Amino acid sequence: MDSKHTKGGYDQADTQGRQEDPSSKKIQQQDVKQSQNDKTPSVKDIKVMREEEFNSPRYNTCGNIGKAVIVSNFMEGWKAGTGDHLVARSYAKKDCEVLEKSLKSLGFKPLDENEGKMVYKNLTKSQFKDLYKKAATEINYRPKVGEGYTCVLFFVMSYGKPGLIQCHKEGKEIKHPYVEQKDLQEAFQPQHNPSLALKPKFFIIQTIPEPDNKSDDVSSEEEEEPVKTTRRIPREADFLTYASDDYCIQGGDNDFIKAVVEVLNSLAEDKKKNETAMEIQRVLIRINKTFKEIRQNNRIRIPCVTSSLTKQLILF
């Protein structure tokens, strides 16, 4: 299997010239209310973490599966401006609805439980950064009182390229800027939030190729040649990324999201029956298999798995 390695293990991309507008509005920060006994553990606390958690072959399974964030750009509520060759992703609203329902049925919690929503749509670069930094640094994933979280899931759907997520332009920006995938994941390093130590950081990222001035709810007749699945292992531990950059929209449906939701719903049924979940790598294999079945009459690129997990991740 072919492998590519760059510094840090991620594909790098030149983003020079895409400067962030300093006058951009930031997402309003919600107060994270925690009691004195519920503060984020310090680095010192992490160092004295129970030895069995370090040595266990499995990540610690908590009462709460995890926090989940869904970002969907270029969807309902956004209209292309003059000279803008991107089009609104007409199928994205349905994707968000079924995905959020599926994750909640599994037991994932919204970032802000008082607000109750998982979906954040049509974000500028500054808004996107504010959101992922909030998820990475303002949540205590292993409180001293009460149940912690098994993992954190950050799900992104947008236009883009491998390693690059496209956000909405703002201010005087002429082009829609990109956020590098490596910057998103860097924010979740335990040095920024010690409670994330030994917690799996799970990213599912769909970056759809730009439609080249044609509606993206119609399947392209000219399919690209399939390429081999690549596994890139970053230096940092406890990260898992599942990324699709294939054009897989046909008949108004997003085949990648359809496959993900089908498997997640199957897991939710297993949970209702008090059955133990599959290990996460087996879950991804099942999604790939389902994706192939849905796309059986089309050439496809299998989603890329990037893993630096050091243990087995079993959600419940």
Image: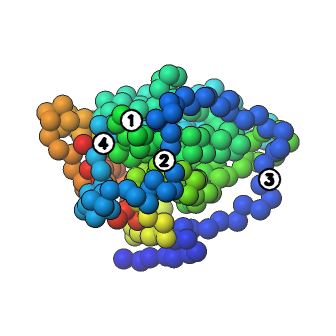
Count of numbered circles on the image: 4
Q: Nearer the viewer, residue 44 or 21?
A: 44
User: Mark 1 and mark 2 in contact (Cβ < 8 Å)?
Assistant: no
What residue sits right under mark 4 in the picture? 62
Label 1 sits on a secondary structure element that is loop
What residue sits right under mark 1 in the picture? 145
What residue sits right under mark 2 in the picture? 41
- Nearer to us of marks 2 and 4 is 2
Which quarter of the figure is the C terminus placed in? Answer: top left
Which sits earlier in the primary sequence, circle 2 or circle 1? 2
- Nearer to us of marks 3 and 1 is 1
Q: Residues within 10 Å of mark 3 (few under 14, many from 20)?
A: few
> How far separated are the C-alphas under marks 3 and 1?
42 Å
Residue 186 % position (x, y): 57, 58
Q: Amino acid at mark 1?
A: Val
> How far separated are the C-alphas under marks 1 and 4?
13 Å
Q: Residue at the location (55% across, 71% down)? A: 8
Label 2 sits on a secondary structure element that is loop
Residue 22 % position (x, y): 83, 44
Q: Nearer the viewer, residue 283 or 199?
A: 199
Relative side of 204 to 313, left or right: right
Q: Amino acid at mark 4?
A: Cys
> How far separated are the C-alphas under marks 2 and 1?
11 Å
